[in-house]
Every structure is written in C-alpha cells, then in structure tokens.
Amino acid sequence: MIQICYSYKNREFLQLEDALLNHLAQNGKTLIYALLEPMHDALSKENGRIRIKLDEHPQIELEGFSVDVKEQIEMTLRGEA
C-alpha cells in the first residue's frame, strides 16, 4: 500500500485546510494513482510513500520503495514508461 502526501515548509499534510486547495490536492492524488495503475501488482507489495513538496522548488520524493519499483515510478512520472 502506498501513501501520497503533500509537504510545505517541512510540514506534511494528508488533507489541506482550504477547501479549494484540498480539492486540487485530491485531484492530484487521483491523477497519480491513475498514472501508477499499470503498476498496481508491484505497488501492492510495497509500503512506500510519495511526498509532493510544494515549496519554492516543487518536487516529488519517493520513500520506502524497492529500487526497481522506484525506478519504474520515476520513469512513469517523467513519461518514459
């Protein structure tokens, strides 16, 4: 099972306070799950976390995934898979 969370200034949010931002965040999670759907079997065996950092330089961090799955996720997010 994987978890997707947002981070801003070193604070993690599973749900954002503002209704509009929370709606956008939920849509973002839905899109990431849809992108990773072809990898469902591999991801079901993982216990990782996808952290979307919304700081000055936004980035996506992958934690707790095996090396092969992490590489697959990175390739998918870059559009190479």
Image (spheres, rainbow, N blue to C red):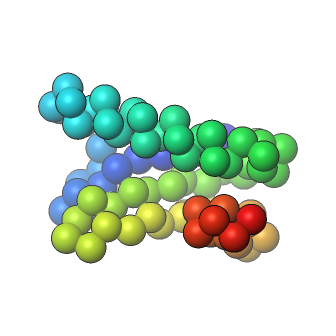
Q: Is 4 displayed left or right of 59 in the figure?
A: right
Q: Is 79 displayed left or right of 39 in the figure?
A: left
Which residue in the rendered view is the most extreme toward the front? 79
80 or 57: which is nearer to us? 80
Q: Quadrant of the N terminus?
A: top right
Is 41 drawn above or below residue 80 in the view shown? above
Q: Is residue 45 visible?
A: no
Is 36 drawn above or below residue 9 in the view shown? above
Q: Is residue 38 visible?
A: yes
The residue at the point 22 percent across, 65 percent down is 55
Answer with the quarter of the image where residue 41 lies. top right
Q: Is 30 displayed left or right of 43 in the figure?
A: left
Is 33 drawn above or below residue 48 in the view shown? above
The residue at the point 33 percent across, 61 percent down is 53
Number of numbered discs visible in the structure rendering:
0
The residue at the point 31 percent across, 29 percent down is 23
Q: Quadrant of the C terminus?
A: bottom right
Q: Picture coordinates of residue 48 (x, y %)?
A: 61, 54
The residue at the point 63 percent across, 65 percent down is 79
Q: Picture coordinates of residue 65 (x, y %)?
A: 66, 62
Answer with the quarter of the image where residue 40 lies. top right
Which residue in the rendered view is the most extreme toward the right? 41
Q: Picture coordinates of residue 5 (x, y %)?
A: 41, 47
Which residue in the rendered view is the most extreme toward the top? 19
Q: Picture coordinates of residue 75 (x, y %)?
A: 67, 69
